[in-house]
Amino acid sequence: MDTIQSTSKLSVEKLIAAAFAETGLNDFGAFDPREGMTRFVQDINDNVLLNDAGLASLSAIINRWLVNGLRFAHDIKKHPEILDEQVDDPLVILGMTRVGSTKLQRLLAADPDTLCIRHWESLNPSRVPDAPADEEDPRIEMDRQIIDAMIKNNLGLMQSHSVKIDDAEEDIFVQLPTFKTVGHCWVLPTPNYYDWIRSQSLHDSYVYLKQMLQYLQWQKGGRPSANGDRRWILKTPPHIGNMDMLVDIFPNAKYVFMHRDIHEVIASTARLIEMLFRTCMDVVDKKMVGAYVLRLWSEEMTRHLEQLDALGSKIDLIDVQYDRLRKDTFGVVRDIYQLMGRELTPAREAALRDWEANDTHGEFGSYTYSLEEYGLTPAGVDAAFAEYNRRYFPVQPAR
């Protein structure tokens, strides 16, 4: 990575002008990103020391969010029937980072009668205009280049969260063009933006998520499949703390809440976030990363537990422990299919078992992490997550 620190700054005006020029469009529709984008960019310009490669990379990422937002708004206006697509009953996998939710989502998405956001769709959910219908979607090649660059420039990130073009991916990525999600806070350390986000209603970003799912479902030919209706399998850690909006926007959703020893979660998450920050920064203070991760996740979990209490019987939810997913994978799968009221047919189970047999998780090598290297202690983590531990880990795992 380039080790020269950049003296340039991101410009909201220039980034938006570039997206207008690239697309020939200038209307973001009902979801104008400028307010949140200004806050996000300001926090980065004021407090994050990007290197030249990081400035270029982040500029390209923001450009992609803006371009997709513009193209999405254009297609919605041109094809209003998109908003007739029925997407109100997904299975939503909840949990913090590093709890096994990625494996569970990708496993369940192997069922041919489900819908998920593929990695190449997550980065570019909006259609490329005038793309030949009889050729490979150009968004796939865009993703291929991005993944190759990740492997070349940040192998540590791929060790923490490996991706392939067709992998099921987190739905937070299709919300990012709104610039009103907690997900932006994991791109770079932006505590001021986080404070602002949590002073705002994020309801519109969840309306946007619903419309993006309708848009993607429309692109996939609609909901019906050979065996009936297809159901969406959603997953993203930033749904923690936003249950009230999920229940409002997706009234018939079912939920799986994943749990893992909180010390493992925070230490592993700190390592993942460090790798993300290193994409754009030469110098990353590990103690800053630890404090940042502990603050964001403890505050989001506190909000999440309060919302669960308030919602009560309004949600259909089962809890799954990480260790059980590892040791009794298909017992967990059967519980989830029962929750959804869905039959685990021999064909569906065979598809899931085939995926599991061919899963290449860990192909980029192993890695280690600890609370101590991020300036954290088990006691400090326990104090931040006291209520979470009381509910889900009343007997602490042996150490």
Image: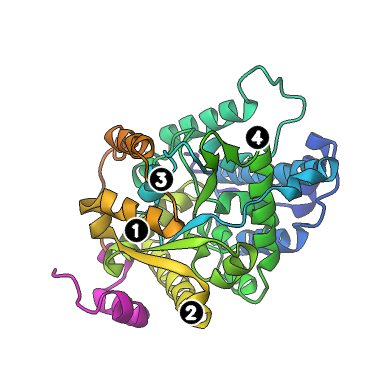
Query: Which residue is under mark 4?
Result: 221
The 10 Å Cα crowd at callout 1, few under 14, some 14 to 19, many 20 or more, is many
Mark 4 vs 2, N-terminal side? 4
Q: Evaluate if marks 2 and 1 touch, with contact meaning CB atoms under 8 Å apart.
A: no
Q: Secondary structure at mark 2?
A: helix
- Picture layout, residue 262 above or below residue 152: below
- Asked if residue 391 is among those painted magenta in the image, a careful observer would answer yes
Q: Evaluate if marks 4 and 1 touch, with contact meaning CB atoms under 8 Å apart.
A: no
Q: CA distance from mark 3 to mark 4?
A: 20 Å
Query: Which residue is under mark 1?
Result: 99
Q: In the drawing, does residue 243 fall left or right of residue 287? A: right
Q: CA distance from mark 1 to mark 3?
A: 16 Å
Task: State whether residue 162 appears in this view.
Answer: yes
Mark 2 vs 1, N-terminal side? 1
Mark 4 vs 1, N-terminal side? 1
At label 4, the amino acid type is Gly
Q: CA distance from mark 2 to mark 3?
A: 26 Å
The 10 Å Cα crowd at callout 3, few under 14, some 14 to 19, many 20 or more, is many
Query: Which residue is under mark 3?
Result: 108
At label 2, the amino acid type is Gly
Mark 2 vs 3, N-terminal side? 3
Q: Closer to the observer: label 4 or label 1? A: 4
